Image (spheres, rainbow, N blue to C red):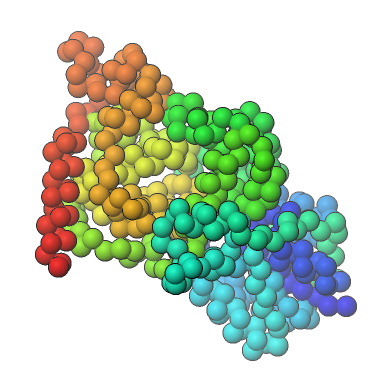
């Protein structure tokens, strides 16, 4: 009987894991492998919050595999070298993995195919990250991907989907295999994580899903933009690390009240995956160049990062990011627009800062959303500017979100918290800064500069 290696990357679950399910079905022995890659955990993508969440995931994944008679084999180094070396050691005829998008993932998959073939081992990619795999849907009028969300959503909603794969009941390792030195040795607990970061793992993700769906799914369309309500699913870290299957979420929630609006958000995730698959440099290059010339104001950038811009709704979002390793999606749009279109700062600086703190930090989602906000991506209104005061009045009308994260303003009542500079002298908080820019003037200057640059480019 055959032996297979399953290389876990960021599908860290047993349920609906097509690579694992296929290997378990066709092989007597299955070797689940995770390689701690220094390029990921120690490089610019290895934020402490994501590394800590990854540890949680691997700890639980190993325990679940042991309950099924197997274990998680841990190695350090280059995942391609380690996977092929292990396959040769155990006499495996195949290495199964989950396909991914982005420049690093593409190169890893290409290198794995070449190295495995040279060693006489088959490298077999499987779906598992998206609902509908990147590249599966093409515009009827031609082109390699959809550039606008709405037509993609129409086709995506009708697309055939693979069946959800059951978790294997048993996993059998080859005899005398070295499972590695243990998680504490290969992936130490990082310091300086966000105090209220989420904890990782498939079971935690499934419990979060069940609680949230029972309590809030039915009203999702009405409540998901309510900043103070804090009733979004908070499933994004579990989707990023593959603790939960986006396909399984669609299958389980379809038909329930409120599910249409939530499933549409999962479609946005797939949309960004298919964009990234065809434009893998999305984290560094403009998808659509607007010929922008960016400001390089270190003080303004530092004020934005620290949540000291003088705009409470912006500062609340930035402080939530550091406290929780997560930020409400509406706050992400507000803070991103402020950096790019009020401060005139390159969107890449903001995207990098988000990646440094977000537990759900994802190249495709983070970069595509930042480019959407900057007007260099897939937004059909590239020059839209979010007015932070109007956003605050609409999505935090009583100011509860701001007071939760900006304690200097806790004494201000109601909506006055959004414009503390208008509060009469004795009641005005002395330890909160004045606005670093005038929004109307800054937005007008940005739009004028962009129009001028585009005219020069003609």
Q: In this view, does 247 lie above or below 428?
A: below
Q: Quadrant of residue 216?
A: top right
Q: Is residue 282 above or below residue 447?
A: below
Residue 236, horizontal then vertical, whole percent: 54, 46
Residue 141, horizontal then vertical, whole percent: 44, 69
Please state which of residues 438 and 12 is positioned toward the viewer in this rendering.
438
Residue 201, horizontal then vertical, whole percent: 66, 47
Q: Is residue 20 above or below residue 84?
A: above
417 left or right of 331? left
- Locate the N terminus and report the quarter of the image it occupies: bottom right
Residue drawn at the location 11% of the way across and 64% of the way down: 456
Residue drawn at the location 30% of the way across and 50% of the way down: 381
Residue drawn at the location 17% of the way across and 58% of the way down: 293
133 left or right of 71? left
Q: Quadrant of residue 91?
A: bottom right
204 left or right of 140? right
Residue furthest front as drawn:
141
Residue 258, horizontal then vertical, whole percent: 59, 35
- Locate the C terminus and report the quarter of the image it occupies: bottom left
Residue drawn at the location 34% of the way across and 15% of the way down: 414
* Label total for image: 0
Residue 55 visible to the viewer = no
């Amino acid at each position: 009987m055959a032996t297979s290696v399953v290389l876990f990357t960021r599908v860290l679950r047993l349920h609906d894991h097509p690579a694992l399910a296929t290997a378990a079905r066709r092989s007597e022995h299955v070797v689940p492998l995770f390689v701690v890659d220094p390029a990921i955990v120690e490089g610019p993508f290895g934020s402490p919050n994501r590394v800590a969440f990854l540890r949680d995931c691997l700890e639980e994944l190993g325990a679940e595999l042991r309950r099924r008679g197997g274990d998680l084999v841990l190695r350090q180094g280059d995942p391609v070298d380690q996977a092929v070396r292990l396959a040769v050691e155990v006499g495996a005829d195949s290495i199964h993995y989950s396909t991914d998008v982005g420049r690093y993932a593409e190169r890893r998959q290409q290198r794995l195919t070449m190295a495995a073939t040279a060693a006489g081992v088959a490298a077999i990619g499987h779906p598992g990250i998206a609902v509908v795999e990147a590249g599966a849907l093409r515009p009827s009028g031609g082109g390699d991907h959809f550039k606008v969300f709405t037509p993609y959503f129409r086709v995506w909603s009708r697309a055939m989907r693979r069946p959800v794969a059951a978790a294997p009941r048993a996993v059998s390792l080859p005899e005398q295999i070295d499972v590695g030195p243990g998680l504490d040795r290969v992936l130490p607990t990082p310091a300086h994580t966000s105090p209220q970061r989420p904890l990782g793992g498939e079971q935690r993700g499934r419990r979060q899903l069940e609680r949230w769906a029972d309590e809030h799914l039915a009203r999702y369309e009405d409540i998901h933009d309510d900043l103070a309500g804090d009733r979004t699913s908070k499933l994004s870290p579990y989707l990023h690390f593959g603790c939960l299957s986006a396909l399984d979420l669609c299958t389980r929630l379809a038909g329930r009240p409120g599910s249409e609006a939530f499933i549409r958000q999962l479609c946005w995730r797939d949309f960004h995956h298919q964009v990234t698959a065809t434009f893998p440099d999305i984290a560094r290059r403009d998808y659509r160049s607007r010929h922008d010339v960016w400001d390089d104001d270190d003080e303004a950038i530092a004020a934005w990062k620290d949540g000291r811009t003088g705009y409470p709704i912006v500062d609340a979002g930035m402080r939530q990011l550091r406290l929780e390793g997560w930020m409400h999606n509406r706050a992400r749009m507000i803070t991103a627009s402020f950096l790019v279109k009020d401060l005139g700062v390159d969107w890449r600086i903001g995207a990098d800062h988000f990646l440094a703190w977000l537990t759900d930090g994802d190249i495709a989602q983070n970069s595509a959303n930042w480019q959407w906000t900057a007007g260099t991506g897939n937004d059909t209104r590239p020059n839209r500017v979010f007015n932070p005061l109007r956003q605050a009045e609409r999505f935090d009308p009583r100011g509860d979100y701001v007071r939760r994260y900006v304690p200097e303003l806790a004494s201000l009542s109601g909506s006055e918290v959004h414009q503390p500079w208008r509060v009469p002298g004795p009641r005005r908080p002395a330890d909160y800064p004045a606005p670093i820019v005038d929004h109307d003037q800054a937005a007008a200057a940005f739009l004028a500069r962009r129009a001028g640059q585009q005219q020069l480019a003609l």
